Image (cartoon, helix red, strand yellow):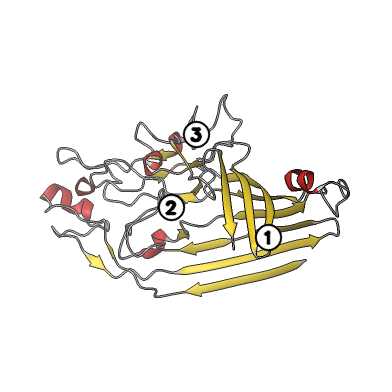
């Protein structure tokens, strides 16, 4: 059994961004409202974005090999990664690319786009007890042993909690005092059993009513909280997690010395679990697609739809 802890910290990492605080030249009516913190020039103000990265990962590993031909290994990690920008340019699905306020990068301090709190993986390999030299079939002839004996079963399992996402406002008119990120009225998380059906498919993944757009000016009339940044943070909610089991059945045929034929029968996501992933459209709380999942992961490690495949390999 192994237990370890790893941590890292990075500051003044390379990166750049453009402020989202651009507004048009102001009328006299709007000027007092803009003084609350937005730039009043007609062009975007820019500053270098120097991301902060804090990462910690304690993990535990346990493995064993038995005389009966079974090998297994379990690994569990609890991780936390915090930064102010996960990428120098662009964003992941559900992430937030811009600095909300280039003069106050602390507003973007939050979980990294890739952060997953709990990660569990398992690996197992078992030599089936059939064939010559095994528990059953030790006296089989060459043909029977060649067909039934010598098979090996292997499997991998993965279970992750979801990556984070940022809730945004669709169609925010920055020049009118609105904000890319809304105000967060309360937590916004939704329990899977809170309604009938599947969370994210039959009802929204998060509580849309927990968020409210920052109001903007209309016809030279500005509400009191116009030209303020929404208080909803970056990467505040978890997306869907992942659970997938892959298996393989392998048989090696010895043709002659130095020549071997291998047959593999494999399946990915054996139980065909639907592993949804975050899409940017679901993060806009005031859009028709708010909170609804519409895509699944890729085949293999992404936990996509179940796939069966076979492979034949000749080694010499």
* Front of the two marks 2 and 3: 3
Residue 57 horizontal/vertical position (percent): 61, 65
Q: Is mark 1 on a helix, strand or loop?
A: strand
Instruction: Kindly identify which residue carries mark 3.
Output: 200
Depth check, front residue: 73 or 96: 73
Q: Quadrant of residue 2?
A: bottom right
The answer to whether the residue labelled 2 contacts the one labelled 3, judged by CB atoms less than 8 Å apart, is no
The total number of labels drawn is: 3
Q: Distance between the residues labelled 3 and 1?
A: 56 Å
The crowd level at tag 2 (other Cα within 10 Å; few <14, some 14-19, many 20+) is: many
- When the figure is inspected, residue 66 is found, relative to residue 145, above or below; the finding is below
Q: Alpha carbon of mark 2 to alpha carbon of mark 3: how far?
A: 21 Å
- Which residue is identified by label 1? 256
Q: Residue 277: give x, y in percent of width and height.
A: 48, 43
Task: Give left or right: position of 221 versus 228.
Answer: left
Q: Which picture quadrant has residue 36?
A: bottom left
Residue occupying image coordinates x 78% and y 66% = 1
Pinpoint residue 167: horizontal percent, then vertical percent.
41, 45
Q: Which residue is drawn at 82% across and 47% down?
A: 141
Q: Name the residue under label 2.
A: 233
Q: Nearer the viewer, residue 193 or 105?
A: 193
Quadrant placement of the C terminus: bottom right
Asked if residue 216 lies left or right of residue 298, the reply is left
Describe the element under mark 2 as helix, strand or loop.
Answer: loop
């Amino acid at each position: 059994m192994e237990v370890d802890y790893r941590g890292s910290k990075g500051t003044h990492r390379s990166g750049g961004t453009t402020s989202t605080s651009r507004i048009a030249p102001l009328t006299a009516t709007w000027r007092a409202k803009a003084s609350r913190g937005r730039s009043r020039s007609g062009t975007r103000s820019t500053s270098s974005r120097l991301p902060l990265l804090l990462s910690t990962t304690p993990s535990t590993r346990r493995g064993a090999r038995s005389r009966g031909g079974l090998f297994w290994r379990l690994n569990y990690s609890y991780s936390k990664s915090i930064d102010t920008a996960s990428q120098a340019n662009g964003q992941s699905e559900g992430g937030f690319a811009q600095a909300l306020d280039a003069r106050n990068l602390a507003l973007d301090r939050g979980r990294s786009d890739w952060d997953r709190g709990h990660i569990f993986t398992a690996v197992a390999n078992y030599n089936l007890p059939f064939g010559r030299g095994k528990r059953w079939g030790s006296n089989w002839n060459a043909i029977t042993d060649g067909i039934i004996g010598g098979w090996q079963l292997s499997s991998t399992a993965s279970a992750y909690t979801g990556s984070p996402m940022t809730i945004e406002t669709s169609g925010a008119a920055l020049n009118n005092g609105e904000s890319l990120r809304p105000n967060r009225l309360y937590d916004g998380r939704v329990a899977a059993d809170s309604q009938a059906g599947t969370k994210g498919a039959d009802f929204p993944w998060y509580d849309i009513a927990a968020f409210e757009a920052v109001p903007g000016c209309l016809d030279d009339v500005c509400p009191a909280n116009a030209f303020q940044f929404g208080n909803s943070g970056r990467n505040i909610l978890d997306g869907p997690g992942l659970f997938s089991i892959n298996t393989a059945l392998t048989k090696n045929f010895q043709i002659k010395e130095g020549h071997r034929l291998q047959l593999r029968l494999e399946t990915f996501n054996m139980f065909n679990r639907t592993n949804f992933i975050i899409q940017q459209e679901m993060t806009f709380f005031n859009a028709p697609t708010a909170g609804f999942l519409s895509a699944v992961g890729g085949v293999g490690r992404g936990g996509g739809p179940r796939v069966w495949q076979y492979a034949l390999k000749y080694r010499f």
